[in-house]
Amino acid sequence: MKRSILTLLAALILAAPASFAFDPLQAIGSIVSNATSSTKFDIADLQGSWKYSAPAISFASDDALSQIGGLGASAAIENKLAPYYKKLSITSAVISFDNQGNFEIKLKRGTLKGVAKKQGDDGALIFTFQGTRTGRQVGELAARATKSATGELTLTFDATRLIQLVKTISTYANNSTLSTISQMLESYDNIYVGAKFKKQ
């Protein structure tokens, strides 16, 4: 495992463009966290409030080789996303769940509400978003969730649908930063984007 992590880290450093501020310690932490996370949890295990800690990326592929490659790629992409998350104020996000999966995501620019339902034992979730005033359903997102041995929660969403939904229900509609993120992610197939959270 140690040899694999060092090999991935070396490859990422060599592949990173000169303009890209690569953080080796964050990359190692991301790879280890992803490699030791589990999808074995009940929706009630998410109960409580969770505060944003870092960007997160996952790939919708169960192929072992793709997953190994995905861990290395995700660390690099997560580093690239960090400054954009800061510009969008995602770094202030707090997500709260009750034991039934009802959630509330508090962002600097507003609050999103809805319900999350688990779709099996592989970490798949469906997030149904509701209008904060009407309570009506405004969209659904496929998501992937894991919990690490240290209790860190990672939530990632289908990138294409997430960006579409954010544009629809928030003030981000004409945001150039969001457009930059969209362009960055569109070259990857079946990519999920989100964040890591630590329990408050």
Image: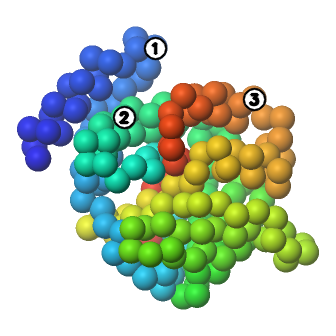
**Disc 3 versus disc 2: nearer the observer:** 2
Query: Which residue position holds label 3?
Result: 176
Question: Cα distance, mark 3 to mark 1?
Answer: 20 Å
Kind of residue at badge 1: Ser
**Disc 2 versus disc 1: nearer the observer:** 2
Residue sitting at x 16%, y 31%: 7
Return the x and y of residue 132 as percentages of the image width and height.
Answer: 83, 71
Question: Cα distance, mark 2 to mark 1?
Answer: 17 Å
Local secondary structure at mark 2: helix
Q: Are marks 3 and 2 in contact (CB under 8 Å)?
A: no
Return the x and y of residue 155 as percentages of the image width and height.
Answer: 50, 60
Locate residue 119 relative to residue 138 in the image: left or right.
Answer: left
Query: Which residue position holds label 1?
Result: 19
Residue sitting at x 76%, y 63%: 139
Local secondary structure at mark 1: loop
Q: Quadrant of residue 120?
A: bottom left
Query: Which residue position holds label 2?
Result: 73
Q: Quadrant of residue 24?
A: top left
Local secondary structure at mark 3: helix
Kind of residue at badge 3: Ser
Return the x and y of residue 33 as percentages of the image width and height.
Answer: 29, 54
Q: Quadrant of residue 196?
A: bottom left
Kind of residue at badge 2: Ala
Residue sitting at x 75%, y 29%: 176
